[in-house]
Image (cartoon, rainbow, N blue to C red):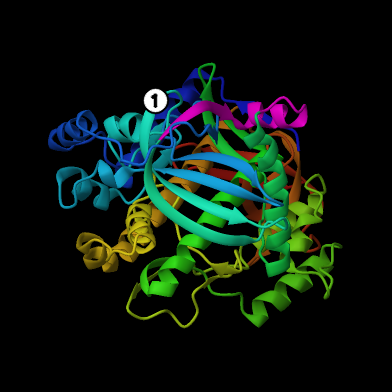
Amino acid sequence: MPDRRTHVTASAAQSELATALAELRTALSLPDGFPAPVDREAEAAASTISLPDRDLTAVEFLTVDPVGSTDLDQAVHIERAGAGFLVRYAIADVPALVRPGGAVDTEARTRGQTVYAADGRIPLHPAAIGEHAGSLLPGVDRGAFVWELTLGEDGQELAVSVARAGIRSRRQWSYQEAQAAIDDGSGPETLLLLREVGLLRIQCERERGGASLNAPDEEIVFRDGAYTLERRASLPVEEWNAQISLLTGMAAARLMLDARVGILRTMPPPTDDAVAAFRAQTTALGLPWPQDVSYGEYLRTLDHHDPRALAVMQAATGLFRGAGYVVMDGTAPADPLQSAVAAPYAHTTAPLRRLVDRWVLVICEALCAGRTPPEWATASLGELPAIMGATSRVASQLGAASVDRVEAALLSGRIGDEFDATVLAIRNGDMTVQLADPAVVASMPRPDTVLPGTVVRVRLLSVSIPNGKVELVAV
């Protein structure tokens, strides 16, 4: 799917949008900067850090991230090991920079995760840690938790361990740069093997019944003096890279399950009624989900250029619900699965941006070394589900409300215009539609004969930037 970009160019709309976004931060009680004691403690930790005894700086790690990223949690190195592969996945050693019970730790527990707003992100850690001493930047030595995952020739995991080590990333690749270097064969061995391993891991996902929705990304950016809403299909390298993170998260979950200590990211399977309803929706849309095809494989067959597929993906987002965290303290949960992954899973690869990963890393490292996990981590595990749940709700509210306001601003100068729109869903007499250009999603009254997946003509009646409301009517 090609990029869809629309700019808010009117200065009045820009000013009103900037005010609305700032007020949204206030309404959600989002912090502005860090208290001075937190900054001072972070800077002190960053200036006194020492590397682990194990030295892996000769290993040619690299990072693959969005353009301009500064909080680099992961670096990867892949080499052949007989008929299989050795994947080394280095994760930022945030625990070495955050003193349990200290000012940085206390502040991080109030934030839970980095939150991404249209007008700037609200980071989990001060820049001294999140963008400098903790970030796996190229050309500098950093401490990391290095996962070593031995895979067979079919991509299945054969062995796993994690230990602290000093590493040095050789280059920071953007997704676009990495994809181009893989496609033309000019990339280093790790990038070329990332495709091979990534494709094998996707096949493993198919075999275990996992599912990746891979809906087009939606992002708000500020460019050329205007807010821009972009929707684009992800590059293949993004999915290959994500498979390494999933592999590591599943390995972490198994380590903790075996020891019955730690915290899992879980999601219950969809109910039989939800599956039946979704299957009926796909049939009504003219893209039936065959009985003998898995959910994940069905989603992979969808053509994102087909308006009916947009409606199917909208319906699919509601099939898996109830994601949460389950703590283990001597007893394993009755159902440890993350059902979309189709395996036990733990968050462990983004400690600069997500609080819970710091706990998972120190617990898994201790288990691999044959030590008892640190008391600070096991004693506070019970606090994490509530922290992560609350901050995830705030992040979700911020993201949705920000998009609504930018979409309203994009349409502010087009009152009375008509648009083609795809019907994504119908609920309680209203329908959710996506305009063709600009790609704005909004709710509106449903004409009696309209069904999901159809394209309708709509007229814009009004917009309100402060509350993100767009009023449409069928022509």
- Within-10-Å neighbours for mark 1: few <14, some 14–19, many 20+: few
Residue 248 image point, x, y percent:
52, 55
Residue placed under numbered mark 1 in the picture: 140
Residue 97 falls inside the magenta stretch? no
Left or right placement of residue 475 versus residue 433 in this view: right
Q: Secondary structure at mark 1?
A: loop
User: Against 223, is 264 above or below?
Assistant: below
Q: Residue at x 38, y 75 (%)?
A: 260
Magenta range: 167-187
Q: Residue at x 32, y 60 (%)?
A: 366
From the viewer's side, name the closer residue of 452 and 223.
223
Toward which corner of the image does residue 261 lie, by quadrant? bottom left
Amino acid type at mark 1: Val
Q: Which image quarter is the N terminus in?
A: top right
Residue located farthest toward the left when viewing the structure as drawn: 37
From the viewer's side, name the closer residue of 371 and 460.
371
Residue 374 image point, x, y percent:
24, 61
Residue 464 image point, x, y percent:
50, 39
From the viewer's side, name the closer residue of 203 and 149.
149
Residue 173 falls inside the magenta stretch? yes
Q: Residue at x 53, y 62 (%)?
A: 250
Residue 249 image point, x, y percent:
50, 58
Left or right placement of residue 298 versus residue 400 in this view: right
User: Against 287, is 55 above or below?
Assistant: above
User: Against 3, is 475 above or below?
Assistant: below
Q: Can you see residue 361?
A: yes
Residue located farthest toward the front when viewing the structure as drawn: 82
From the viewer's side, name the closer residue of 91 and 474.
91
Residue located farthest toward the top when viewing the structure as drawn: 224
Q: Residue at x 78, y 62 (%)?
A: 298
Q: Can you see residue 424?
A: no
